[in-house]
Image (cartoon, rainbow, N blue to C red):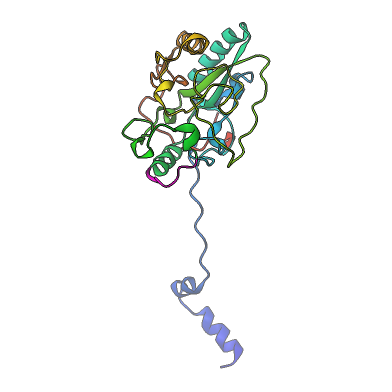
Amino acid sequence: MPRLAVALRALALPVAALLAIAPSTPAHAKPEPKAPKEFVALGDVDPTIRQEIRYFTPHNFTGDPVDGYRRPMCVLTRPAAEALHRAQRQLLRRGYTLKVYDCYRPQRAVNGFVKWAKDLDDQRMKGEFYPRVDKSRLFEDGYIAGKSGHSRGSTVDLTIVPLPALPTRPYVPGEKLAPCYAAKEDRFPDNSVDMGTGYDCFDTLSHTLDPRITGAQRANRLLLKSTLEQRGFVNLAEEWWHYTYQPEPFPDTYFDFPVARRSLTG
């Protein structure tokens, strides 16, 4: 058949047939969810509060950076951030600063924790974060759950650091681990005051008022507790570092937008 005839015949094809032979266009990726306007970056409210966002790094109980943490930044509801700012002003006058380890936590990160906890073969970080707890009991003992108050945006994990704040060296994956309840000079270095255990220590010694924690360690925990309670925060009794601002703007909503500047709409 002459070339011209072939071309004319192609033009006569029904539209549906032409679409069938056309190359397919890839579907656009689903856009990431955004934070409501009530969420802010803590650094915009108070840039003096130190930030060491552990889940952005491999230095956490999973041993890997956690899904959903795109930037090492603290995101909170504005009332919680402003309450931290007031607490910070109080501590600065005493020669201390707050340091946050975790703030808003996406639901996808919580889902990742659940998946990790079910993988009993992955024990890489046991020597530091849960030396005395069998991994098979993390759900039963309450260390891992399918929902976290952090995902509602008004919960923060934090500590107190004396000024001038010295830097904390980075964790080197594969390095020898020390128990999180060891003496301060023996466990992983942290520039904070001595709270008796490290952050995210899955152990009953992490209970805020555990009677085995005495002296300066107890005084440091009580300083953090009293300072934050004056500003509207409530402590989780099982974790000396865990505080929730009340009343929460979103008491029943668990968000999943990633931790990133671009997630903030304000």
Query: Residue shown at 56%/93% (left/top)?
Result: 1
Question: x and y percent of residue 106 in the render?
Answer: 46, 36
Q: Can you say which quadrant of the picture contains the C terminus?
A: top right
Numbered-mark total: 0
Residue that lies at the very extreme toward the left in this rendered image: 140
**Residue 93 to residue 110: above or below:** above
Query: Residue shown at 53%/69% (left/top)?
Result: 23
Q: Is residue 212 visible?
A: yes
**Residue 19 to residue 12: above or below:** above
Residue 205 placement, left or right of 101:
left
**Residue 131 to residue 124: above or below:** above
Residue 79 placement, left or right of 149:
right
Q: Quadrant of residue 122?
A: top left
Q: Is residue 264 visible?
A: no
Q: Is residue 229 magenta?
A: no
Q: Is residue 119 magenta?
A: yes
Residue 170 placement, left or right of 242:
right
Residue that lies at the very extreme toward the top in this rendered image: 93
Q: Quadrant of residue 117?
A: top left
* Residue closer to the observer: 149 or 144: 144
Question: x and y percent of residue 153 in the render?
Answer: 46, 27
Q: Quadrant of residue 98?
A: top right
Question: x and y percent of residue 37 in the render?
Answer: 50, 28
Residue that lies at the very extreme toward the bottom in this rendered image: 1
* Residue closer to the observer: 75 or 168: 168
Question: x and y percent of residue 223 in the render?
Answer: 51, 9
For the stretch drawn in magenta, the main secondary structure is loop
Q: Which residues are magenta?
A: 118-124
